[in-house]
Image (spheres, coloured by chain):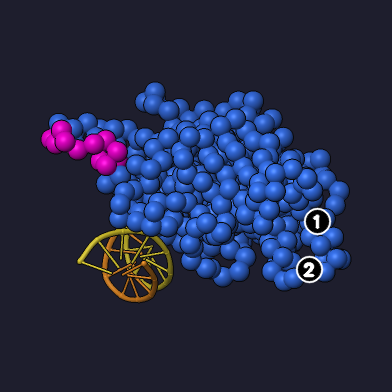
Chain colours: A blue, B yellow, C orange
Amino acid sequence: MAFDPDAKLPDVLAGGYHLSTQLQALLRHPLDRSGQEVAMAFSQELSRLFEISMSMLNSNNTAAPEVNTGNSTGVSTPAKDQRARSDSGEVVTPSKKSREEGVTSKEITPSPHKDGYQWRKYGQKKIQNCKFSRYYYKCNCHRRCLAKKKVQQQDASSRGQLMLPPVFEVTYVNEHTCHVLRANDAAAARMVSPGTTNNRRHHALAGAARVGGDGDLFDLFPHIIGGGCGGRAEEEKDAIVSCLTTVISGAAPPPATGDPAAFVLPQPAGHSVSVADDGAMMMMVKDTGFSWGPSSFCPVVEEEAGHAELAVNRHGDLHMDVAGFADTVWAQHTCGAWRRA
DNA sequence: GGCATTTGACCTAT
DNA sequence: ATAGGTCAAATGCC
């Protein structure tokens, strides 16, 4: 497969995702020698695509922010920053007219729901001359947050990319004010009830899900979920690099010699990945003490073939099906409300 | 029962 | 009149 030098990151990632699903389908059955060769070719191509993605990500990280949104509050907007540097989407600068209408940014992305915020759908409309309906979402982090987004699936056939997963044009309207509103609420809550912790207050406002009954994910992963609605940009970046590395690592065969139990793969600082000789893979993420890995050590609910798997067992351990990584990794950044991707 | 989603009706701009 | 955007009752899921 020749690499198109003009290819965009979403296309490369989409291609990788498509390849991984094909590889999954292949690995669902016992493989003979030729099957193994095909699987190896797939995995090598997958590795190459993710290497390309990582180099694209690294080059994007040095780029300037995409849009001056005229945020007069002086408060940073984490998820917007994430979009600029870490999502797989292509950021499009909105026109002057669009900005006057409150449009803060536009982007083309294969994963329109993974931008670090939690959204509530409030409308759907069939648009003239469009094959697909347009979907309307409001920010669900805070009731009074004015941020909205429109998601319009693009016609793949018009792009001549019938084999790739769908891509979406996402238009963001109005700045998020949820972090400011939440901070105000937290301050008010402290005045009313000094015994209420910030974390729990945040969680109640975000309507976040409880996990396993013993605690919630905001308590378990405060440094990942962060104090605001979106995660911190640097950790987003780390997470992406870790995820890509993990997928690449998973596609590579274990060495013929060395520690029979596991071998350690090259990782970004603060992360480690090990692959046992039975193929089980575990990744330790920074100093969380939690690990990501397949069902060899964590009971999970089975889902239909080919779909990403993300579950939390009753002990609070995270489980992830590595094959579904590209689509699943962002699920953790939804304002504390962890949900299946 | 609470919550998110769906969907037809309604509103507004052109 | 038409299209795009929003509302809110109905519905389904957990």
Membership of A197 in magenta stretch? yes
* Left or right: A178 in relation to A42: left
Q: State which quadrant residue A240 falls in.
A: top right
Task: Reply above or below: A234 against A255.
Answer: above
Report crowding for label 1: few under 14, some 14 to 19, many 20 or more residues within 10 A (C-alpha).
Answer: some
Using the image as rendered, state which of residue A278 and residue A300 is in the foreground.
A278
Outermost left residue: A192
Type of residue at label 1?
Met
Q: What is the span of residues highlighted in magenta in the rendered image? A: A192-202
Secondary structure under the numbered disc 1 in the rendered image: helix
Q: Position of residue A7 (x, y in %)?
A: 76, 44
Disc ID at residue A31? 2
Residue drawn at x 47%, y 44% is A290
Quick one: label 1 or label 2, which is nearer the N terminus? 2
Report which residue position mark 1 lands on.
A40
Membership of A35 in magenta stretch? no
| Marks 1 and 2, how far apart at CA | 11 Å
Residue drawn at x 55%, y 60% is A295
Secondary structure under the numbered disc 2 in the rendered image: loop
Residue drawn at x 48%, y 62% is A299
Residue drawn at x 52%, y 35% is A286
Q: Is residue A291 visible?
A: yes
Q: Chain of mark 2?
A: A
Task: Reply above or below: A168 against A102.
Answer: below
